[in-house]
Amino acid sequence: MQLALNRLKETFGDSILETHSCLGNETAVVEKEKIVEVIRFLRDTQGLEFNFMMDLAGADYPERSERFEVIYHLYSLSTKKRVRIKVRVPEANPVVPSITSLYKAANWFEREAFDMYGIRFDGHPNLKRILTFDEFEGYPLRKDYPVNKRPKIPTPDPLIKV
Amino acid sequence: MQLGDIITTRIDEVVKWGRKFSLWPMPFGTACCAIEFMGVVSSHFDISRFGAELVRFSPRQADLLLVMGTVNYKQAPILKRIYEQMCEPKWVISMGACASSGGFYDNYSVVQGIDEIIPVDVYVPGCPPRPEQLLDAVIKLQQKLQGIKEEN
Ligand code: SF4
């Protein structure tokens, strides 16, 4: 069952910071510098073939020193296995390498994580807000975003480009 | 000429009477409430009994804006522009908790009532409101057009 995690540990050694596997949910926390390599390895290695990027999300843990987490959910259409990869980034420099070069599907997911948490994806072709509007201030899913804060109603019509 | 062949009235009374039975709604349906509107226009509830069945999808051809559903901040300028594109005279019905107050979406993304952006004539409570409630709103608007004050 733990094939993917074992292969990762063999190949990347100390760059795999943590792993756990519970009821078939395999999770690995990896160094953010290695994320593109790790995902490429999972996608291209025979026997693993995680060829479907199902989800990419951000998360905020204010009590941690590395406050933000980016979580990748991969699925293999040939082996029917799933794996979850996480990277952690500090608030001061929340930058993660983009995986859009591997999966085009990651484009909008990374934009969403940027929009909601302010995590920046290095190498993303078009990193701008996707759900809120360009003038929106702050990152609404961060735990310290004030509950009662309301944005100003955007004045220029977003449909009309001047 | 016999008694009853002629009635006298004021021109603005006739205009008001005509207007109130020929409202042309423009549906601004953004969420679940708009589904309820389909019931209102369909045969069972039949909004045409009140002369407001001619649904137009161009604000230029409508005089009643029906805002049905959740309106978020990103959408607010679009709603405002659609309201501005309608010719005078024009009226607005805000259908449902979301359009009237933000509803349970008390958060960063949803406008807390469309009256922050455009004037509203009739608010309809409910999540979603029953079709009868929207018909009631149309009747209330008709009374308003005729200049009848609500008695209660
Ligand atoms: S008021 Fe209720 S039914 Fe209407 S749009 Fe909001 S959530 Fe949907």
Image: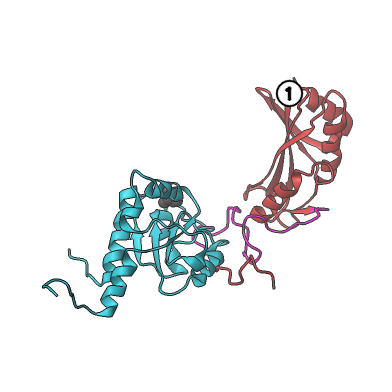
Chain colours: A red, B cyan
For the residue pair A93 and A81, the one nearer the viewer reads as: A81
The residue range painted magenta reads A122-150
Question: x, y percentage for residue A130?
Answer: 67, 55
Neighbor class of circle 1 (other Cα within 10 Å; few <14, some 14-19, many 20+) is few
- Give the prevailing secondary structure in the magenta stretch: loop
Mark 1 lies on a secondary structure that is loop
Q: Which residue is drawn at the image coordinates 45% and 69% (left, top)? A: B118
Question: x, y percentage for residue B16?
Answer: 30, 72
Instruction: Please tell me how many numbered marks the rendered image carries.
Output: 1
Q: Which chain carries label 1?
A: A
Question: x, y percentage for residue B131?
Answer: 34, 48
Question: Which quarter shows the C terminus of chain A?
Answer: bottom right
Relative to residue B88, is residue A122 depicted above or below?
above
For the residue pair B121 and A78, the one nearer the viewer reads as: B121
Q: Which amino acid does label 1 sit on?
A: Lys
Question: Is A129 colored magenta in this rendering?
Answer: yes
Question: x, y percentage for residue B147?
Answer: 25, 72
